[in-house]
Amino acid sequence: MTDTTIQNVPDTAFMAAAYRAIESERPDALFRDPLADKLSGERGRAILASLPPQAMMGGWTVIIRTCIIDALIQQAITQGVGTILNLGAGLDTRPYRMALPETLRWIEVDHPTLIEWKRTQLAQEKPRCQLERIALDLADQHARQQLLDEVAKRSGKVLVLTEAVTPYLPEEAVAALGADLRARAAMQYWIVDYFSPASYEYRRRSGMSRAMKNAPFLFEPNDYFGFFATAGWQPKEIKYFAKEAQGLHRPAPFPWHIRLITSVLGLLMPPEKRRAMKRYAGFVLFEPDLRKD
């Protein structure tokens, strides 16, 4: 009998695609991803079926993060970005589903097995921009640096996307990636997952860490923004899940009693603590800190 649990980090790409497929079927869907079901396949659906009830929060974050990143990409394009470099692209389908300029260069980079699966499944589909796929192990620093050199030489402004990538890397690997990007002037923007220290503890208490034991979060710096500042990056924009979800009219799917308790506690908390609760996780659009040049 095939094990339907998550076996490794690449499996999380199938999980995310399955969540996007479910969202696309909703009458009030925040986006439509018609290729998500084809990409997630039986593997993605089996993984979702194996997850504990607490994983509903994981599905919600996939949907909200998709909306956040879509908006950041569109914003960057209006600001002159001509190349999107999607490192650890997984089963993302933005080049097919988003309204993008035909001249936009979109480069997807990921493990050879994921790239081949995607190439096979989408062979008959037509992207809306100039799409390239590169099979590469991002842990190979020499190969990664060669890739970044090539992209930088052929591009003007580049937006680097690492959606659901850095959480699975140790701190030294994120620091090395940040340094590699910062060393190339073309890399003007970098979209990165944000998790607060409180969110690390929540994952452990909720049971998600056990469900994801084969793909654990490794990147848990005590001072998130200080970490990236050391690497030469400063936040240009921060999008927190709670605030963005409120604007999208898609609140977190907590059980009613949890929502009630949270509401009561919120009334008793000082303002700063209430703000901190709304900033537990999200995404950050970084730009180079030119003061450090």
Image (cartoon, rainbow, N blue to C red):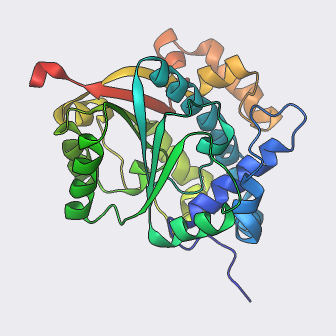
- The residue nearer to you, when weighing 198 against 129, is 129
- Report the residue at 20% width, 23% height from top: 289
Check the picture and name the quadrant holding the N terminus: bottom right
Picture coordinates of residue 275 (x, y %)?
51, 17
- Which quadrant holds residue 147? bottom left
Could you say where residue 44 lies in the image, as x and y percent from the top left?
71, 64
Left or right of 180, for residue 98: right
Q: In screen coordinates, is 202 left or right of 166?
A: right
Q: Is residue 181 visible?
A: yes
Q: Would you place residue 175 above or below residue 7 in this image?
A: above
Residue at 56 percent across and 34 percent down: it is 102
> In the visual, does 257 lie left or right of 182?
right
Residue sitting farthest toward the front: 103
Pick the front one: 169 or 257? 169
Task: Please give the name of the residue rendered at 19% of the width and 38% of the height, measured from the top-left corner.
Answer: 184
Q: Quadrant of the C terminus?
A: top left
Furthest-top residue in this view:
271
